[in-house]
Image (cartoon, rainbow, N blue to C red):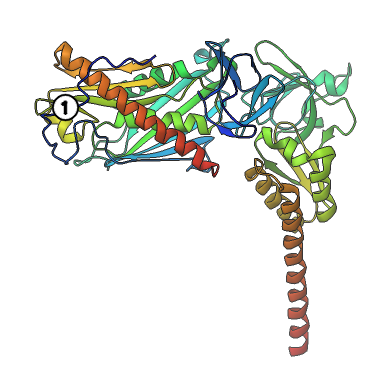
Amino acid sequence: MIIILTSSLTNSDAKKRPDGRAFDELRPLKIEAGVLERADGSAYLEIGDNKVLAAVYGPRELHVRRLLKPNMAILRCRYNMAPFSVEDRKRPGPDRRSVEISKITSEALQPAVFLEKFPRSTIDVFIEVLQAEGGTRCAGITAASVALADAGIPMRDMVVACAAGKSNDQVIMDLSEWEDKEGEADLPIALMPRTGEITLMQMDGHLTSEEFNQAMDLAIKGCQSISEEQKKAIKNRYGD
Amino acid sequence: MLLVEDKQIVIPGEVLAEGEFHSGRGTFMEEGKVCSSLVGLVAVRDKKISVIPLQSKYLPKRGDVVIGEITDIRFSMWNLDINSPYSGILPAAEVFGKEKRELNRAFDVGDVLFLRVVDVDEVKKVKLGLKGRGLGKFRGGILIYITPTKVPRLIGKKGSMINMIKDHTKCEVVVGQNGVVWVKGKPDMERVVQKVVKTIEEQAHTSGLTDRVRDMLTELLGQEKEEEKEKEEDQYQEELIQ
């Protein structure tokens, strides 16, 4: 159950943000499902200048026997940034940051998937960031759950992620790269919109408890609007 | 209270009904509500709600007939890929009985077999067998892979769809319940069947498919005939030039 704590959602003394958005406005969002022919399920997502591609393979057989669980499937994620996704060329290959994001993505998606239906198998999720502009972990999780649904994997709900934070002395929704770097705090969350269960919450920077509640409410509101786009993307794939 | 219509497309987590409804395949119960767990079409039968998936993997069930490809030969059994998260095993005893022979004399890696699922145990070990009518090794032909949930659509009511394809193209067609289709006939006819099967897979969730497939078949076969005619004319003209 989702409970909005603060009544700050009508902020009168709001300042304009660098890109002209309101404090509770998302960047332009586009999601498309089923873009890759060879993957079992796939999705392409654009939010602002972020471009993210997610592919799902499985459930399939895994030959690394020690990883398999006898009573359920395992969910493996790989988050990867393309060398050309950022201003200065990124050194290709996994680094400390992408290993962390891979882990939290898999943990954010796991509670939603009925893993016990496929014992002794694996579901692989690949997230490729083609272009980054702040908030790629949220974009990755959102795209991955559309790809999982497209692959026909049974789930309790479609996980959706959105960030909120504080920049320029103002609590705002969906931080851009500049707002994230120059700002005071960043709070990405992932949740299951039907029940409101939170599957991921991270924070860096400093927020007072009042500001934290405001940021949480903004992030939840952001998740709800992104969730609607996710649903549309899936239904569009089958011409509805 | 039913919140969706029959045959409506639903997504994972969507609430389908509240109150006195039962949860069928592709759904789950939470706090007295029936929710979908898949992307698929709603099917309501009396008080039971199920969701028929649009995309899925094959989960082996005892008694199914499947098409598999041999991937490995071991001491007393073959390993087969059955287009599923779980590979199948064919014990040598199923083929030879008590007699002992060399396994690679009978079937080799890459051979395609038509088999029956004899048993699936708790850890999803899939035992296959060759006892039954029509089961055995395929010679030649091509394989087409489709989503297993669309197999009933490809077969049609009492085999109407599949028989239509067979009649029009004069191909041998065998469909495994794991979504593998084996086709053998003239090479150009095999291609026609492949095209048609892929179309059926894409449009499985729409109605009036049988008629459209019939039109497509006549159109494709018409083209083939015209091409042949053109070829004949070309040959005739060449002959004239000579």
Question: Of B118 and A53, which appears nearest the observer?
Answer: A53
Residue B16, given in percent of the width and then of the height, sits at 57, 23
Q: Residues within 10 Å of mark 1 (few under 14, many from 20)?
A: few
Q: Residue at x 55, y 22 (%)?
A: A62
Residue lying at 73% horizontally and 62% vertically, measured from the top left? B219
Residue positioned most to the bottom? B241
Above or below residue A6? Residue B174 is below
Quadrant where the image shows the N terminus of chain B? top right
- Secondary structure under tag 1 reads loop
The image quarter in which residue A5 lies:
top left
Q: Which residue is mark 1?
A: A11
- How many marks do you count on the picture? 1
Which chain contains the residue that carries disc 1?
A
Q: Amino acid at mark 1?
A: Asn
Residue A129: image x %, image y %?
A: 33, 37
Left or right: A193 as drawn, with respect to B167: left
Q: Is residue A234 above or below residue B32?
A: below
Question: Residue placed farthest to the front in the image?
Answer: B1
Kindly tell me whether residue B36 is visible in this rendering.
no
The picture places residue A198, in percent across and down from the top left corner, at 36, 15
Q: Is residue B143 visible?
A: yes
Residue B214 point in image, percent of width and height: 76, 54
Q: Quadrant of the C terminus of chain B?
A: bottom right
Quarter of the view holding residue A3: top left
